[in-house]
Amino acid sequence: MLKWRGLFGRVRHGPLRGRMRRRDFSALLGGAALALAWPLAARGQQTKLHRIGALLLGNADAESFRAELREGLRNSAYVEGHNLVFDFRSAEGKIDLLPKLAAELVALRVDVIVALYTPCALAAQQATREIPIVVVSGDPLGTGLVTSLARPGGNVTGVSLMAAELHGKCVELFRDILPSVRRVAVLLNAEDPFWKQIQEQVQLAGRAVGIEIAPSVMVRGPNEIDAAFAAMKKQGAGAVVVQASLSTKTVAELALKHGLPAATQTRSFAEVGGLLSYGADGPDVFRRAALFVTKILQGGHPANMPVEQPTRFELVVNLRVAKALGITVPESFLLRADQVIE
């Protein structure tokens, strides 16, 4: 009797064995084909390309936002250049450009739009009611981005920064770091509708700690900021609360030029030359936004994703700026700080 040895082992010829051999051989070939096809299919799924649009105003937080968003998605196996493409659009501080930039992202048919701060979030919402939007904004409920924090109900979800209250907190911090301050001004962004909530909270904080709040100064673009600081100085302001959407390096430099201590909620403002900041841990918040994006890419819907609020807050003090302004920061204040920039 003939014998045959090959890939599938040793088989003896015979009528019954012949039938068994053909059946087993076919089954094995089918199994081998499936075994080869499965990883190919799996690789096809893993390399599906997701497109994320990001809408930025262009303030000091922009670079940290980009870095943390990329890192957060990488930690969830979404890697730029492999299965992920980013389309970043920045208005470079010009709010009037945001509707056009948001429309560009919609035209690209991105899978998700991530919007940093209220002006960007509102522009994205106006551009689409279908593409999921993840926001990092001052007050999504108060500005009409969502109908409920627990059940957003539309195509928008994300993180609320509780920003209005934190701008008010800056007034209290000025009292503690500058005991002699009697009047605090507010620099507001006329093109950012969130200014109303900020103005209200700053005035409430001023009444609570016995500090007069000077009439707010509104600006409509970068070209008006230098004159705005000059006006606040003329009004006798001893410090300035800056609306976060204006928290750029240029604003910090102009505040220093006019001899005015400046503060806002965004950590990056203190890092680029503001006196201090108090707000949510920015990098942590941006990583939280990346988790929302991950959930959406995996099939979640914004309508059913509760808006989160930060649980970690940071006080950052820039001692270099304090020295330039002739301010001696009390030791008790430094002990409260989460970071001191020297």
Image (cartoon, grey):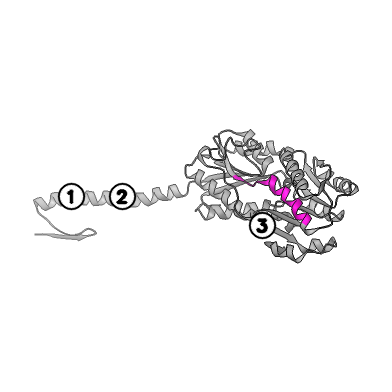
| Residue assigned mark 3 | 314
**Earlier sequence position, callout 1 versus callout 2:** 1
Q: State the separation of the CA atoms marked 2 and 3.
A: 57 Å
Residues under numbered marks 2 and 3 in contact, where contact means CB atoms less than 8 Å apart: no
Q: Which residues are magenta?
A: 159-175
Q: Residue 342 occupies which quadrant of the picture?
A: bottom right
Which residue is nearer to you in this view: 43 or 144?
144
Apparent side of residue 160 relative to residue 239 in the rendered image (left or right)? left
Residue 207, position in %: x, y?
Answer: 77, 46
Residue 33 tag number = 2
Neighbourhood count class around disc 1 (C-alpha, 10 Å): few under 14, some 14–19, many 20 upward: few
Residue 234, position in %: x, y?
Answer: 91, 47
Q: Residue 13 occupies which quadrant of the picture?
A: bottom left
Instruction: Judge whether 160 appears above or below 1 on screen.
Output: above
Q: Is residue 43 visible?
A: yes
Q: State the separation of the CA atoms marked 1 and 3.
A: 72 Å
Q: Does the magenta-highlighted stretch encompass residue 301?
A: no
| Residue assigned mark 1 | 22
**Earlier sequence position, callout 1 versus callout 3:** 1
**Earlier sequence position, callout 2 versus callout 3:** 2
Q: Does the magenta-highlighted stretch encompass residue 173?
A: yes
Residue at position x 68%, y 51% in the image: 62
| Residue type, numbered disc 1 | Arg
Q: State the separation of the CA atoms marked 1 and 2.
A: 16 Å
Front label number (2 vs 3) = 3
Which residue is nearer to you in this view: 193 or 203?
203
| Residue type, numbered disc 2 | Ala
Residue extending farthest right:
234
